[in-house]
Image (cartoon, rainbow, N blue to C red):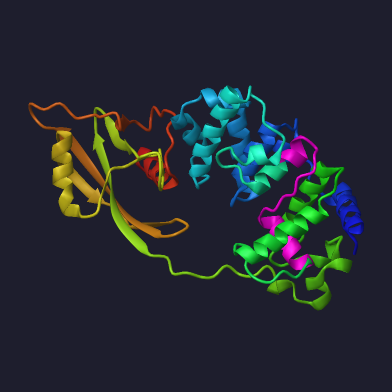
Amino acid sequence: MTTQEFQNAILKWFCVSGRNNLPWQKNISAYSVWVSEIMLQQTRVNTVIPYFERFTRRFPDVRELSNASIDEVLHYWTGLGYYARARNLHRTAIIVANQLGGCFPSDIDTLITLPGIGRSTAGAIRSIAFKKPGAILDGNVKRVLSRFAAIEGWPGHTRPLKNLWSIAEELTPLRNTDSFSQAMMDLGATVCISQPKCNLCPITTGCKAYLSGTQQKYPGKKPKISLPVKTTHFLMIYNKKLGYLLRKNKSQGIWGGLWVFPQISKIQELDLVLQELGLKSIESRAFAANRHTFSHYHLDYVPILIHAKELKGQTTRKTCGERWYNPKTPVSLGMPAPVVSLLEQLNN
């Protein structure tokens, strides 16, 4: 199968079987492509759709996003995970709005200098929004090309990744780049899946994995590692007058910039925390332990509900990194999914 035959087959398939009703395909702009591509990183389309719709209703363009507080941006991201994506989104919006006149650049080299925009996202913005040649290589496209060219090894490793980029750039057309990029992502998402539907694929005549019956061999599996386990206690400190105490994490690291319950590693630290806050426990109750898994470790946490009152003669402490939160009158704060879930349980 020649490069031209590959391109024609992909574009012909897209006209009949491609997706054309996704929310970011309406009124296409560099902004909508950018937001959707960032959200779709390591996240499924069906999960992203409602988040994208809520996010773009609140932040319809890059200037609205740049003018928002990071707390509000993280609030609209809550539940999508990988929160560095949202922080980078906000940083890029500020740069584009204030330094680039509110317009996204169309060249790859400039795009990849913006926070959170890698080579594939830059290619998607260039090809879909600006209709200029730009190769893409998201997870779905990696799967298609790994099978098509029988590329050995896990695509996260340097050598197979380099080979895949070379193939992606060679196959990317000079025209109809928007349809081609979307078609490649759609093919990987709907046909060239874990259990591939090869009978629906337009490029089987040139697919090395299909022709050799080795579809399951590609792409190579990610090396398995045993994730370490960390433990903590979530202190759900409740005061009848004030609500639940939340603390804001530092901007970097796990759950960076998000509001969380105070945490302690040992239950013996509880009295000291309350004393520092000017509070005294009236009663407390531990909930069942839960596990939240990050990319590189498991977090086992035990939520503890503490009804607390103010100590006599003391004013309850409140620093700039702390606030009392009432679930019955919520405000726009970014919180990780476990905290949101616990607050919903407490509110009910």
Residue 51 position by quadrant: top right
Q: Quadrant of the N terminus?
A: bottom right
Q: Percent from the top left, x then y, of residue 244?
A: 29, 35
Residue located at (65% from left, 37% from top): 110
Residue 302, above or below 86 = below
Question: Does residue 25 appear left or right of residue 45 in this picture?
Answer: right
Residue 269 visible within the image = yes
Residue at image point 90% right, 61% down: 2
Nearer to the camera, 32 or 160: 160
Residue 283, x across and y down, in percent: 17, 44
Q: Main secondary structure of the magenta part?
A: helix
Q: Residue at x 71, y 44 (%)?
A: 123
Task: Verify whether residue 146 appears in magenta.
Answer: yes
Percent position of residue 63, x then y: 59, 23
**Residue 193 seen from this side:** no
The quarter holding residue 187 reads bottom right
237, 320: nearer the viewer: 320
| Residue at left offset 44%, top offset 45% | 337
Q: Is residue 266 magenta?
A: no
Left or right relative to 245: residue 93: right
* Name of the residue lying farthest toward the left: 313
Which residue is more in the foreground, 157 or 278? 157
Residues in magenta?
A: 125-148
Give residue 281's quadrant in the image.
top left
Q: Quadrant of the C terminus?
A: top left
Count the marks: 0
